[in-house]
Every structure is written in structure tokens, then in C-alpha cells.
Image: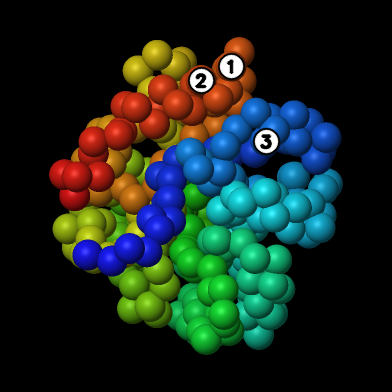
């Protein structure tokens, strides 16, 4: 036992799918960094810029900078370093960028004082077997997810983004230390929106997810903080099961 203060590590990552800092700020002001992290994607980052990301960090939020880098190894490595300099908690790359690219990204972050977690996107969920065939890939999406997750693991990345349906398989294959970040999460009380394969927050954690990306069930709620707290209650005791 130590007397170190417990640093909270919220499992919920709220997806800030907004077109401007002003719109996102209205939500952020109503949330609480002790209860959630925030995901900033390409739309908001392009509109609001790095200074605004630093602002979120200064408010105490863990920020997942979801820019899915995919380029030659040197370029991606430098982009990851630039992301790390903003103080973000997590960055990601496309596993389809390959072994050299993922390894370069990991090496670029090694030894940094505030090293963000580095995870990979395997197969975009918008891609079906026909889309893969167009690219000359004859594998089923699920098989490709597995192959790319293994590759990310071999490159010593911290984890992958995956659907909650894939979490149990990946956890069994790659171990409990490999971080699984799962979107497509819907609390019992929320609608599906355009997500096809959804899972409840507690079920996703039981399946092996470490962090849950949740957008509209919180961002579109009449009371976002209350919606966040209610998901927090749904998952409150799951951590003890792991
Ligand atoms: O509003 P909702 O909870 O559906 O938002 C989910 C977030 O996770 C969005 O930012 C979406 O782009 C992202 N995402 C996803 N499915 C993936 C990868 C990312 O829904 N496979």
C-alpha cells in the first residue's frame, strides 16, 4: 500500500464530433475530467487547431487525438511527436501503414517525458468484404482485423481500436495488457443512431475493452453530465471483475 493519491483513469472517452471549438466547448464545460476523457478527431482538429487541444489538456482532460496517421514512417513518426508535444493521452495510426511505419511511430514516442499511448486502427468498420476485394485483399474483415492487431502487437504498440464484438477474441489472443478501445457503445436507455453493431458499456468491458468511445448518447443528451454519470454508474463495479 502507498499513500500516493489515486490518479483517476476514466474508462469513458466522449467523442467530440463537432465542427468548431465553440460548439465543442459548450459540451466540454458541462463535463468533468474526473469522469471522462475526450476524443478529438479530424473535423474538430482541423477546425479548432492544436492550441485548442492544449486547452483541453490544461483543463485536466485526457485527450485521445484521433487523427489516424498513415504515411511514410518518418512522416508519421514526426506527426506522433508533434501530437505528444500537445500533452495528449493517446494518439493513433493506421495499422495498414505497415510494420516499419508503426515501429517508427513507437520509437518516436519512446522516452518522452509524457509519452502518449499509441494505438492502431485495424480495419475501418465502414469497409466490408467487397471494399477489401477492391483493394486486392481477399480476407474477411474479421481475419484482417486479427492479422493487423497481431502486427500492431508485434510492433509493441499499446493497443488497437476495435469493435466490442472483437474485444474478447483480441484480448484472448493478445493478452490483458494490450489496450482495446471500443466505439459503437450504447447504454440501455439510448438509441442506436447509425451504429449497426452495438454493445452496452458493461458488456463491452466484460468482453475485454479497456476504454469505451461514446458520442451521441452523451453529446446529444438533454443533460450530458447526467448521461455521463449514468454510464459511469453502469460500469462502476466492472473494473473489479478484470
Ligand atoms: O455517436 P457515437 O457514439 O456513434 O460516436 C462514436 C465515435 O466513434 C465517432 O467519433 C465515430 O467516428 C467513432 N468510431 C466509430 N466506429 C469505428 C471507429 C470510430 O463509431 N469503427
Gap in angstroms between the C-alphas marked 2 and 3: 13 Å
The tag on residue 37 is none
Up-down relation of residue 177 to residue 47 (above or below)? below
| Disc 1 from disc 2: Cα separation | 5 Å
Q: Residues within 10 Å of mark 3 (few under 14, many from 20)?
A: many
Whether the residues at callouts 1 and 2 have beta carbons within 8 Å, the answer is: yes
Does any atom of ligand 1 lie closer than 8 Å to the CB of label 3?
no
Q: Which mark is residue 226?
A: 2
- Residue 124 image offset from top left, x and y in percent: 49, 49
Which of the 4 image quadrants contains residue 238? top left
Residue denoted by label 1: 223
Whole-percent x, y for residue 73 in the image: 61, 82
* Front residue of this view, candidates 203 and 170: 203
Residue 10, picture quadrant: top left
Which mark sits nearer the N-terminus, 2 or 3?
3
Residue at point 40%, 27% (across, down)? 231
Residue under circle 3? 28
Q: Quadrant of the N terminus?
A: bottom left
Q: Can residue 222 be seen in this snapshot?
A: yes
Q: Using a 10 Å C-alpha cutoff, classify the residue at mark 2 as few (fewer than 14 neighbours), some (14 to 19) or many (20 or more).
A: some
User: Quick one: 139 or 112, which is closer to the camera?
Assistant: 112
Count up the numbered dots.
3
In the drawing, does residue 214 fall left or right of residue 182?
Answer: right
Q: Position of residue 198 (x, y in %)?
A: 37, 29
Q: Is residue 213 visible?
A: no
Q: Secondary structure at mark 3?
A: helix
In percent of the image, x 56 and y 73: which residue is there?
114
Towards the viewer: 212 or 4: 4
Per the image, label 2 sits on a secondary structure element best described as: helix
**N-terminal of the two: label 3 or label 1?**
3
Q: Residues within 10 Å of mark 1 (few under 14, many from 20)?
A: few
Amino acid at each position: 500500500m502507498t499513500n500516493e493519491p489515486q490518479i483517476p483513469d476514466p474508462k469513458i472517452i466522449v467523442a467530440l464530433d463537432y465542427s468548431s471549438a465553440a460548439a465543442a466547448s459548450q459540451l466540454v464545460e458541462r463535463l468533468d475530467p474526473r469522469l471522462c476523457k475526450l476524443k478529438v478527431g479530424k473535423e474538430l482538429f482541423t477546425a479548432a487547431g492544436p492550441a485548442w487541444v492544449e486547452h483541453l489538456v490544461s483543463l485536466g482532460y485526457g485527450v485521445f487525438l484521433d487523427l489516424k496517421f498513415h504515411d511514410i514512417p518518418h512522416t508519421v513518426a514526426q506527426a506522433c511527436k508533434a501530437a505528444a508535444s500537445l500533452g495528449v493521452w493517446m494518439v493513433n495510426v493506421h495499422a495498414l501503414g505497415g510494420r516499419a511505419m508503426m515501429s517508427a511511430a513507437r520509437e518516436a514516442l519512446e522516452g518522452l517525458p509524457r509519452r502518449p499511448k499509441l494505438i492502431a486502427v485495424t480495419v475501418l468498420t465502414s469497409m466490408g468484404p467487397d471494399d477489401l476485394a477492391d483493394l486486392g485483399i481477399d480476407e474477411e474483415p474479421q481475419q484482417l482485423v486479427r492479422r493487423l492487431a497481431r502486427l500492431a502487437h508485434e510492433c509493441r504498440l499499446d493497443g488497437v481500436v476495435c469493435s466490442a464484438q472483437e474485444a474478447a477474441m483480441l484480448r484472448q489472443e493478445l493478452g490483458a495488457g494490450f489496450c482495446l478501445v471500443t466505439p459503437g457503445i450504447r447504454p440501455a436507455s439510448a438509441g442506436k443512431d447509425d451504429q449497426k453493431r452495438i454493445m452496452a458499456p458493461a458488456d463491452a468491458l466484460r468482453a475485454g475493452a479497456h476504454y469505451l468511445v461514446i458520442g451521441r448518447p452523451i453529446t446529444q443528451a438533454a443533460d450530458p453530465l447526467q448521461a455521463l454519470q449514468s454510464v459511469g454508474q453502469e460500469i462502476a463495479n466492472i473494473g473489479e471483475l478484470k
